[in-house]
Image (tube, rainbow, N blue to C red):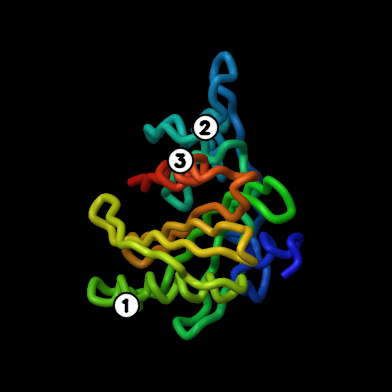
Amino acid sequence: MKANLLLTVCCSLLFMTGCMENGSQKSDAKSNTENNTTTTTTDDGKTDNGGSTTDDSKKNETKNSFQSANGKFSINFPAPPAGPESSIEQNKAGLMQIFTYTLTVSESAGYFAYYKDYHSGVITDSNTETMLKKEADNFMKNIGSSVAKSSSERLDGNKGLSFSGTLNDTIAINMRAFFVGRRYYQFGTIASNSEISEKDSKKFINSFEIIK
């Protein structure tokens, strides 16, 4: 696989047809806190009765630099990511809309997070672990790799899976995923250790929070 195709394949995740979130493209609302110590990026803003735009990140307490109000999660991207890129995935469960955020470090390295909603009734408590493993296996297969290590995770009582592997023996793939109800979240890094250190990868992955 060519290096410049890596993130394209990973982030497209077999998308079939591009589309816009809620029928229209949404721009990111960005705001810097005082002294520029932290940059908070949200994927949408809301307008109050006075007509001004408010940042949802100020309504939900989080230590993370990025928050998706629609996705109901936050994560600490080291810089504002691009997105959301919205597309359609087709599999045995039917059509699903996927929203992806990416921060590209190089042609073969980057951070990303995405989420999608399965149809009602597909995800149950009894099959969640199986579905997590299927998602991991499919993701790794799609980028020409396989799951080398995996471990079960829990976040606020929600089942998850950490998994990793390599590509061409030089690029490390480190991922974590959770099901929250029928919503699937996946996030992680793809890079050589010289581009994204193991420490920085773990810091990013461990920062993920669900916004209630």
Label 2 residue SS: strand
Say what amino acid the circle numbered 2 marks. Answer: Thr
Q: As rendered, which of 156 and 3 lies closer to the eye?
A: 3
Location of the N terminus by quadrant is: bottom right
Q: Badge 1: few (under 14), some or many (20 or more) residues near its Cα, within 10 Å?
A: few
In the image, residue 157 lies at what x, y percent? 23, 55
The answer to the question of whether label 2 and label 1 lie on touching residues, with beta carbons closer than 8 A, is: no
Q: Which of marks 3 and 1 is nearer the N terminus?
A: 1
Which residue is rendered at x = 49% and y = 55% of the image?
187
* Residue 179 visible at all: no
In the shown orientation, is residue 183 left or right of residue 86? left
Residue, far top: 35
Mark 3 or 1, closer to the camera = 3
* Residue 95 visible at all: yes
Q: Which of marks 2 and 1 is nearer the N terminus?
A: 2
How far is the residue under mark 2 from the one under mark 1? 35 Å
- Please count the marks in the image: 3
Label 3 residue SS: helix
Which residue is rendered at x = 30% and y = 62% of the image?
152
Q: As rendered, which of 14 and 194 lies closer to the eye?
A: 194
Mark 3 or 2, closer to the camera = 3
Residue, far front: 169
In the image, residue 25 lies at what x, y percent? 67, 54
Say what amino acid the circle numbered 3 marks. Answer: Lys
Say what amino acid the circle numbered 1 marks. Answer: Gly
Mark 3 lies on residue: 203
Image height of 154 relative to 145, above or below: above
Mark 2 lies on residue: 54
Mark 1 lies on residue: 121
In the shown orientation, is residue 9 left or right of residue 57? right
